[in-house]
Amino acid sequence: MKITPLLAAVSATILLIWSAAAETLVYQGTRGIGTGKHIVFIANDHEYRSEETCPALAKILAKRHGFRCTVIFGLDENGAIKGGGRNMPGMEALKDADLLFFYARFMNLTDEQVGFLVDYFERGGPVVGVRTSTHGFNGQKGKWAKLNYNYTGDDYFGGLGEQIFGNTWHKERGQSHYGSNHVMGCRITPDATAAAHPILMGVESIHAYSGAYKSQPPADATPLLDVQVLNTFHASDDLNTDKPVVNAGWSRDSYIAPSGAKKNARVVYASYGASEDLLSEDGRRFLINGCLWAGGWENKIKQNLNVSIVGKFTPSAYNNGVGLAGVKPLDLAGWNSQIMPANAEIGGLSDPEKVKKLARVIKNRAELRARIATEYPELFAKGGLLEGF
């Protein structure tokens, strides 16, 4: 069959549209408090499963409340989701975003992709950030090196995390681990001084599997959450009394954009956010309420706001290195999709260094241990890297 120039052009356009759709994930709500509003989620961290947290929250905000939610992932060379991926196609979605949900760790992207994020902050867009977002960039070169978490220049000290959220990964002036991550979970409760804040409506107690951070909120912040370290990984009343209560989240009314200009825009930050943390209803509620407040829709927050999971949610164990592999954004499309797909394979188990790090993780995840023992029994055999675990 002869292909005319017009047919070729149409075919190329269709292919381009399909490729763009395959690289990002859009959940389109139909009615509710978010009708006509667009929330963009950036999901690209190495450890805490932002690729699961973000679509789970996006589904709730779209299906339950009518928002259009776009989720942008770090991808590998095959278009599969990769925590810490150096390619994030679809960042142009930020051009018409009404709110950004930012969940990243140590990103290193092209100038063009970072530019869309910078433009969003330069126009003063509101933002909600969780967990590792205070250290969202690392190793970024050239034009946007000032966004790195360890940047020490006076023009953007502490990088994006310190200037936007108010903290960076720095033990003395910012954040550090508090308790033993992967071993000690934590209990998060509302700060008594902010009980009347709209974000805390309906929030009583959150169990977070992600280990506590010791954060030092910026001077202009309104403290919202406190965290108590547990002696157990799973929920319990076994409090670690050697670790006094510290802050776990706050709000701000302004930030400094990369240009150095102050922007009057709402900011919400919480130091939890692993996908397993969304098993807590109040954990989901705080983040959903936070989105509504940051976007200026706080009059829609209600005590019993629907924050129930949409579809099937089976969060995987957070860790640095071993995770589900080969999952593409379109695998998570639709209300009934499972996060993550039941047939997703575990990747990273061929790397001895990654497997060694997994040892302390599986001690508290019986289902994960059982699956690995079934599929890779040699790891637990005598002389195997997980022998004794």
Image: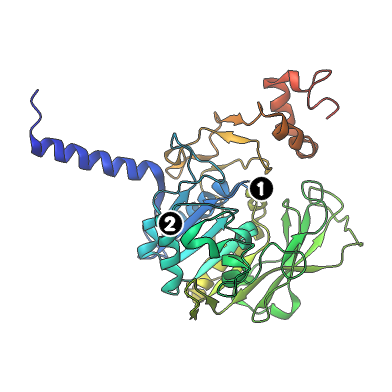
Residue 103 x/y as whole percent:
56, 56
Q: Residue furthest right?
A: 242
Residue 107 x/y as whole percent:
55, 52
The circle drawn on residue 12 is none
**Residue 310 visible from this viewpoint:** yes
Q: Quadrant of residue 356?
A: top right
Residue 353 x/y as whole percent:
72, 33
Q: Which amino acid is tagged 1?
A: Glu
The circle drawn on residue 111 is 2
Q: Which secondary structure, mark 2?
A: helix
Q: Which residue is mark 1?
A: 276
Label 2 vs label 1: CA separation? 32 Å
Callout 1: 10 Å neighbours few (<14), some, many (20+)?
A: many
Tell which of 188 and 376 is nearer to you: 376
Question: In the rendered structure, which disc, 2 or 1, sits on the residue that comes first in sequence?
Answer: 2
Residue that appears at 59% across and 66% down:
159
Residue 341 x/y as whole percent:
53, 35
